Image (tube, grey):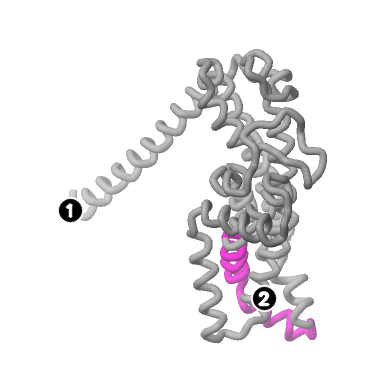
Amino acid sequence: MRGEEVREKLFMLLALLATLFGIVILAFLLAFTFYEALPWLDWQFLTSPPSRFPERAGIYPSLVGSVMAIALVGVFSVPLGVGAAIYLEEYARRSRIAKLIEINISNLAAVPSIVYGLLGLGLFVSTLHLRPGIVLVGALTLTLLILPIIIVAAQEALRSVPDSLREASIGLGATRWQTVRNVVLPSAMPGILTGVILALSRAIGETAPLIMIGAATSIFTPPKSIFSTYSPLPMQIFMWTDMPKEEFLHGLAPAGIIVLLAVMLSMNAFAVYLRNRYARKLRR
């Protein structure tokens, strides 16, 4: 066996071991969490408010608040992010200013989340005088957090569309907007949806920026509107880990983690469905 073949097989073996290591660790963590959560996952847990008694405690107010907030984040961030990406890729001139804007957007995507919490506190609470800890302030702060991520992902998806499609559309007499709407966006939609759902998945699991804007660690009634205070799912889970009774740490907290994972997986499944649907349309 030649030296190149030996090195190739050795590299494949190392890559396989690295993959298996990550899969085994993840599977162990999920199995351990599910094992501790299973006795507590029932209808009462999903429909009850928090309580200092473990057998009465539930996650309903936090679940409703997180779903409301993430829905509002999607309403704010998707049009703004995709619109900014379309302008930068399809309309803006290739100038130094445009390149500088793109570099800054990419850098903003890597800024620590707590910085966005400080920005949300200063902008929405101190300047606009919105009540701290309400669903609207939380959603606006998380929108600032994921907006750069959506813009970058949408730009990459738009760049993947071949220029020949744009040129063919314009050559047939279509305007720039007609080309973007009927040719570019449908072709880039699978990539855009992937970026959007990854950004929303990050937003629903964030805690640090919501602490900064005064979100509650625990509430006993679900928010009735976007102007009501709410407690995000991650903060409720964190509060349970700090409770004195062992049932909170080894029962309710893992159950809350499973619920949070279920929400995130449901979002991912919906995004995969939409992405595959657009992909099938493109193949026809």
Corner quadrant of residue 54? top right
In x, y percent, where is residue 267?
67, 43
Q: Does 91 appear above or below 38?
A: below
Mark closer to the observer (1, 2): 2
- Residue range in magenta is 149-174
- The label shown at residue 3 is 1
| Quadrant of the snapshot with the C terminus | bottom right
Amino acid at circle 2: Tyr
- The label shown at residue 244 is none
In the rendered structure, which disc, 1 or 2, sits on the residue that comes first in sequence? Answer: 1
In x, y percent, where is residue 151?
61, 65
In x, y percent, where is residue 55?
65, 13
Residue annotated with mark 2: 87
Q: Is residue 91 magenta?
A: no
Crowdedness of circle 2 by 10 Å Cα count: few (<14), some, many (20+)? Answer: few
Q: Residue at x 62, y 69 (%)?
A: 158
Q: Residue at x 61, y 32 (%)?
A: 236
Prevailing SS of the magenta stretch:
helix
Amino acid at circle 1: Gly
Q: Residue at x 62, y 78 (%)?
A: 163
Q: Does 278 appear above or below 41?
A: below
Residue closest to the eye, 140 or 46 = 140
Corner quadrant of residue 124? bottom right
Residue closest to the eye, 233 or 91 = 233
In x, y percent, where is residue 115?
52, 56
Instruction: Provide the secondary structure element on which disc 2 rests.
Output: helix
Q: Is residue 103 left or right of residue 142?
A: left
Q: Is residue 29 visible?
A: yes
Crowdedness of circle 1 by 10 Å Cα count: few (<14), some, many (20+)? Answer: few
Q: Residue at x 66, y 78 (%)?
A: 90
